[in-house]
Image (cartoon, rainbow, N blue to C red):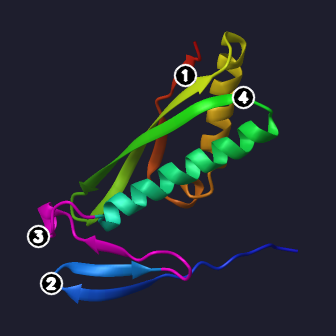
Amino acid sequence: MTTSYVYETEVIWKSERRMEVRTPGAPAVDVSSPPEFQGEAGMWTPETLFVASVNACFVLTFLAIARLSKLDVVSMRASAQGKLEKSDGGGYRITEIVIKPALVVRSEAERERAERLLEKAERNCFISNSITASVRLEPEIAVSA
C-alpha cells in the first residue's frame, strides 16, 4: 500500500506584485517577485521560498537521521544559495542549490560519522529528490570545546 499526504496552500493577490501565501493552521506569508523582476525588496519570493524549502527539508532530514543514529548534535545551522539561470531559447529555472551546513558535535570521533550522516540526509531529502536542480553540500563540522 502506498502512503500519501496532501499539502494545501492558497495564494491571494494583494496589489501589483505582492501576494499573501496561506496554509491551514499557519501564519500567512507576504510574497513578492524579486526586485530584478519588478518586485518589492526585502520580501520573501517564490525563489527564496523554493531554496528555503530544500534547505529546511535537508536540515530536518539530517536531524531525524542523527537522532536515529544517536549522534550528539550540539548545534546546527545551514545556509543555502540557489542559482536561477535563463537557458538559451528557454525560460528561467533553478539549476543548482548549494547547502552549507555548519554542525557542531561533541567529540572528534563523531566528526567522520557526522559527515556520513550529512551525506545520507542529502540523498534522502524528499524535496531535493523531487526537483531537477542539482543539490550540493559544503559542510563545516566542528567539535564542541
In the picture provided, is 57 more to the left or to the right than 14? right
Identify the amino acid type marked 4. Answer: Asp
How much space separates mark 2 and mark 4, taking CA atoms? 48 Å
- Residue at image x 72%, y 28%? 72
How much space separates mark 2 and mark 1, taking CA atoms? 44 Å
Residue 51's x, y, as percent? Answer: 41, 54
Res. 141 mark: 1
Identify the amino acid type marked 3. Answer: Gln
The reply to whether residue 132 is visible in this rendering is: no
Identify the amino acid type marked 1. Answer: Ile
Residue 30's x, y, as percent? Answer: 31, 74
Q: Residue 80's image quarter?
A: top left
- Callout in the foreground (1, 3): 1
- Residue at image x 81%, y 40%? 68
**Screen quadrant of the C terminus:** top right
How much space separates mark 2 and mark 3, taking CA atoms? 9 Å
How much space separates mark 1 and mark 4, taking CA atoms? 13 Å
Q: Magenta stretch: residue 58 in it? A: no
